[in-house]
Amino acid sequence: MDDPPRATGDDGLRLRARVRYLYHGSQPPAVRFRLAVIGVDLVIIAFFLAAPILRNMGWAFYVIDYLIAVVLAVDLAARAYAYADIRDWLKRPIVWVDLFVLATLLFPAWLFNLGFLRMLRLWTLLNSDFFWRTVGRKFDDTRVEGVVRALANLVTFVFVATGFVYATFRGAPGVGGYVDALYFTVATLTTTGFGDVTLPGAWGKLLSIAIMLTGITLFLRLAQALIRPSKISFPCDRCGLHKHDPDAVHCKACGNLLCIPDEGL
């Protein structure tokens, strides 16, 4: 009886080429695949956002938690497999944030108080090349990308800070639930400071100061991204200046003649 056929090195190469095509290709099937992945990511982020309220579901919550862990693990493994240099891939901060999010899903009992950091997944998604090559291809390296990134930083900070306040000061006067923590975070971040919800002790005051200072910084960055004149990405072949006005004829840094293509406008 003949032995069953064995997988060859060519099979592995074909599989890797297929995965790389799906994650990095520009053809419609690859783009549709990445859109589906991004859609799943957004559903997962919505679950993370609602997690403090859904924890009362009991065992069903943990079933969903582990199912999401499997999805994220498969996605991360596929991205690593599709990347040309795994060591270079592991040097990226976004990858380590995603690995930490995965750890909070795999060990919810031990990392329960760090579950609020799962909202960093929103930051990693909107700051990834994967997202901008798929959804934002027309807006890559434009003011729209800058605004979206700045907004992602602000929104992520709001919900991470809310989760930290909820996990650390839950049960304190005025912080009876997740909505109270969100209300305190937004009121403090905007420096409105109504004073109806305050955090007790010196640590509470220090956290309030940190939220105010970080919030002001993120608001300023968002305002700069909104007000800053529109630029396009076209590196000067003489001095390397990357950003230019859409109608620029000469480089502002060195005066070199530019030839910006119409499709970049």
Image (cartoon, rainbow, N blue to C red):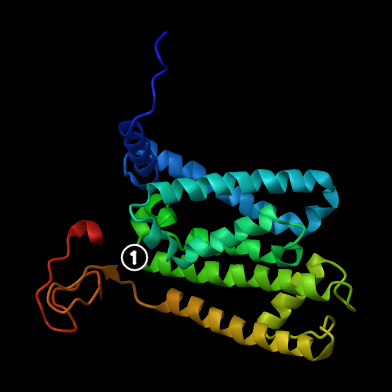
Residue drawn at point x = 46 percent, y = 63 percent: 127
Residue drawn at point x = 39 percent, y = 11 percent: 2
Name the residue nearer the viewer: 13 or 129.
13
Residue that carries the numbered disc 1 in the rendered image: 141
The quadrant of the picture occupied by the C terminus is bottom left
Query: Which residue is situated farthest in the top direction here?
Result: 1
- Residue 217, x across and y down, in percent: 54, 84
- Residue 233, x across and y down, in percent: 27, 67
Residue drawn at point x = 58 percent, y = 44 percent: 71
Asked if residue 35 can be seen in this view, the reply is: yes
Asked if residue 190 can be seen in this view, the reply is: no
User: In the visual, does 181 lie left or right of 43?
Assistant: right
The quadrant of the picture occupied by the N terminus is top left
Name the residue nearer the viewer: 13 or 66.
13
Say what secondary structure mark 1 lies in: loop
Query: Which residue is situated farthest in the bottom direction here?
Result: 202
- Residue 98, x across and y down, in percent: 55, 59
User: In the visual, does 259 lie left or right of 130?
Assistant: left
Q: Is residue 109 above or below residue 134?
A: below
- Residue 192, x across and y down, in percent: 71, 84
Name the residue nearer the viewer: 87 or 123.
87
Q: Is residue 61 above or below residue 29?
A: below
How many marks on residues?
1
User: In the visual, does 23 lie left or right of 77?
Assistant: left
Q: Amino acid at mark 1?
A: Asp
